[in-house]
Amino acid sequence: SDQSLDLSADAYNALYQVNSEQSLLYLIDPGSADESYFWHKVNGSQGSVGGMGGRMPRMADPWPQETIDAIGVWIDQGASNF
């Protein structure tokens, strides 16, 4: 089935310590980008953690590496809500 992540209501709560449906990781595991499936999806490394499907975002060009790196730093620093 084609499952996609719905972030329309509350993106932060939809990601923070929520189990991924595609791997054994949380979508965002505060303090560890390497253990966060969302980071792997935007980085294109989801296959390395048991995930599937394509890189996010699906309908657009990949984000610039500096954006992906900034997401990783944010997660590594605890992924605090803005």
Image (spheres, rainbow, N blue to C red):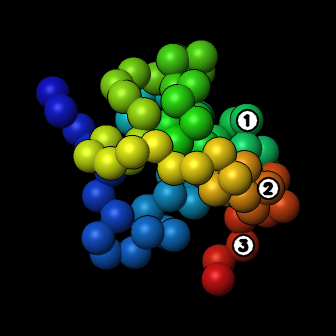
Q: Is residue 18 left or right of residue 78?
A: left
Q: Residue at x 57, y 25 (%)?
A: 45
Q: Is residue 27 left or right of residue 77?
A: left
Q: Nearer the viewer, residue 47 or 78?
A: 47
Task: Tell me the CA gap for discs 1 and 3.
Answer: 17 Å
Task: Tell me the element at label 3.
Answer: loop
Would you call the spot at circle 2 few (<14 residues within 10 Å), some (14-19), or many (20 or more)?
some
Task: Tell me the CA gap for discs 1 and 2.
Answer: 11 Å
User: Percent from the top left, x then y, of residue 48?
Assistant: 59, 16
Would you call the spot at circle 3 few (<14 residues within 10 Å), some (14-19), or many (20 or more)?
few
User: Percent from the top left, x then y, of residue 74?
Assistant: 75, 61
Q: Which mark is residue 80?
A: 3
Name the residue tied to disc 1.
34
Name the residue tied to disc 2.
73
Q: Is residue 46 left or right of residue 73?
A: left
Tag in front: 2 or 3: 2
Q: Amino acid at mark 1?
A: Asp
Quarter placement of the N terminus: top left
Q: Nearer the viewer, residue 8 or 19?
A: 8
Q: Amino acid at mark 2?
A: Val
Q: Residue at x 72, y 44 (%)?
A: 33
User: Percent from the top left, x then y, of residue 11?
Assistant: 43, 69
